[in-house]
Image (cartoon, rainbow, N blue to C red):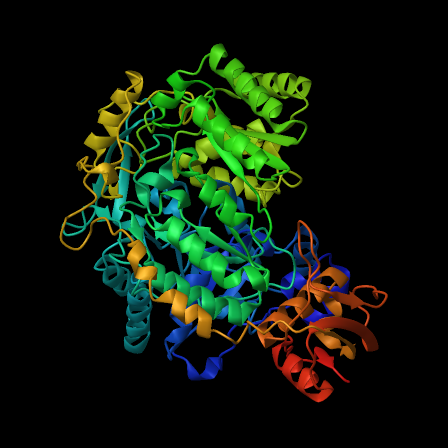
Amino acid sequence: MIEEILPLVSKPSRYLGSEVNSIHKDLSRVELKVALIFPDLYEVGMSNLGLQILYQILNQHPGIAAERAYAPGVDMERILRERKIPLLSQESRIPLREFDILGFTLPTELNYSTVLSILDLAGIPHYCRERDASYPLVIGGGPCAFNPEPLADFFEAFVLGDGEEVILEISEAVAQWKRLRGHKEDLLKALSRIPGVYLPSFFEPRYLPDGRIEKILPLSADYQKVEKRVLAELDPAPFPSKPIIPFMNVIHDRLNLEIARGCTRGCRFCQAGIIYRPTRERSPRRIAQIVEQALGATGYEELSLLSLSTGDYRAVDSLLTCLTRRYAERKIAISLPSLRVGSVSGHLLQEIKKVRKTGLTIAPEAGTQRLRNVINKGSTNEEILQVARLAFQLGWQSIKLYFMTGLPTEGQEDLEAIIDLAHRIKLASKGKKVNLSSSTFIPKPMTPFQWEPQITLEEMEARRGFLKREIGKKRINFKGQESSLSLLEGILARGDRRLAPVILSAFRRGARLDTWSEHFRFDLWQQAFIEHGIDPNFYTNRRREPNEVLPWDHLSCRVTKDFLWEEAQKARQELTTPDCLEGRCLECGVCDFEKINLKSSKPEDLAPLEEEAKSTTRLRAPKFEWTTRVRSRFSKLREARFLSHLELVSCFSRAVRRAGLPLEYSGGFHPLPKISFGPPLPVGMESLVEYVDFKLNGSIRPKDFTETLNQELPQFASGGLRILE
């Protein structure tokens, strides 16, 4: 069925589902089937680390099969609807309707219409009240679960906080319910007893005549408030040592490794900095183990060390030095995508550039020191300029600057200061490239700014236009988020259950894939608001009173509302709050100082790893004085024919790395493996004879080369890539 459709769509590799390290279980031998769904296109969803973590945890359980699903592209959706084909899972290609659990990752409010599109394509009623026990349990998790009220009528349950432990508890509850063949109400009651699980049907909001919430009424005496789950330590938790490798180029096409979770910096606009507290750092030794296993299992050319503020990781200098010593000669670049200005040092940049200079983003957020005090962003103009100068001196050819507009108390002088600071960085670049990106501030739930209004659409357009016009005069590239996208995100972020029919109406009018500007249509949402008599300004352009009941007040991220209000008042006074890692507890409420507290890494944990590095030989070959060119003839059959030429190059390059074959590399700024292909064939065309040349360090027997590489090339259910001789 799928092979008949793939020639008709763009980017058919989105739908192949036979990626290296994907897991295909015999579904007749498992008790529970779970579909992990990312409500966006494949290339976005495959960059989501949380989904990969849950995928491994669930599939390690012998009685559970976890498979994946993503939103289809517009062309694929049209064909599925025309031919009345339900949306299928990636691995087994069975309808989502046949799973026991549909678990949605909810990273942004702009995915909401796509959630409904996926349910519709799966043949599952949108409203929970229309689904009986024969339908899958629909649950959601991720940042949006901290105010899921606009989706409350569509989901049976949400998970607040870390999912590593709770996902297995939910699975066991569903499996037990299936064994007993109970009613759906029995399952919901069992889920309510799991810490961190929120069941919207167990609460009822009551409204005042002016539209504000009067109270959120619990319908069960022993289920009054839901508190997020916290994973006490990262080291013992499972982490993907064999992540799935996509065929196509995805948003973050590299090995992503979470080195810490949480942040203590306390930026007042940042929801992630609040909901992921406390900071827990993975030990350097555990990181090194995961890196070695995952590079061997993937063949990636770049390693990205992830956290909300990677430069604040306590052992970052030692860790980076160790990793570059281990992997520089393998031409594996290391990137730190989230760096606070104050944490960037010359040593850090020197280590990053040893293989190639990965992207560098500086995020001042605001143009003036006054406004940075308001948002509790401690960096000064001089620190920002110093980092930029240092990067340019070390050979970076471009830098990206990130700012926000519409922050509380922002005035014209703050906007002009953005222009001035960017211009000073441009002058320091001495002709190199400076890119400036801006977005509009959105007051998110569970932050100190949750009571603040959002600026109007007209104000957004005016500030964006000013920056674009003035920045262009300085020969700086500008990119700003579309204002209507920011407005819609703000409405949904602080919305309540009255928005459910609006979301459904927008979907039925054609809204989906709203995160993509080419698909986003604000006019459909405007029509939906008018249809249901809802004024969007009620949710955005209105300051909340300190005693007002907020739609998410019955949910807790463990940081107290009193602490958030105190931070809001300090912002008004332009007072900063220190990092609690500097010694004094700020009493935000998240730590219990028994199980849940800060977990820091120790640089000395890296001491034994240098000796281990010397004995690591699988991917490290001796340097010979000669090289060998190997010419291979290969075939590309059945599903493999849907790989584009660039995807084919990536498949072979990573397979050679996984096989441990000693490739030669080019020199220069961006070293590339010396692999040469013959003329490319069109996507969708099979081949019995194609050629590829590899240049290797040293020599190898042709038979050994063929057998070794064939073991690492992707295996498709109906045929694939194979070296013939």
* Image point (38%, 66%), residue name: 609
Q: Is residue 182 above or below residue 310?
A: below
Q: Please identify the residue farthest to the right as the structure is shown.
A: 679
Could you tell me which quadrant the N terminus lies in?
bottom right
Residue at image position (38%, 35%) is 270
In percent of width and height, residue 43 lies at 60, 54
Q: Position of residue 615 (x, y in %)?
A: 45, 75
x, y (%) of residue 259? 38, 54
Q: Is residue 55 above or below residue 725?
A: above
The reply to whether residue 545 is visible in this rendering is no
Q: Residue at x 41, y 80 (%)?
A: 30
For residue 528, above or below residue 3: above
Looking at this rendering, what residue extends furthest in the bottom direction? Answer: 703
- Residue 246 left/right relative to 627: left
Residue closest to the eye, 138 or 664? 664
Quadrant of the image containing the C terminus: bottom right
Is residue 245 visible in the rendered structure shown here? yes
Is residue 490 shown left or right of residue 204?
A: right
Among the 4 quarters of the image, the one containing residue 345? top left
Give the camera-side residue of 668 and 196. Answer: 668
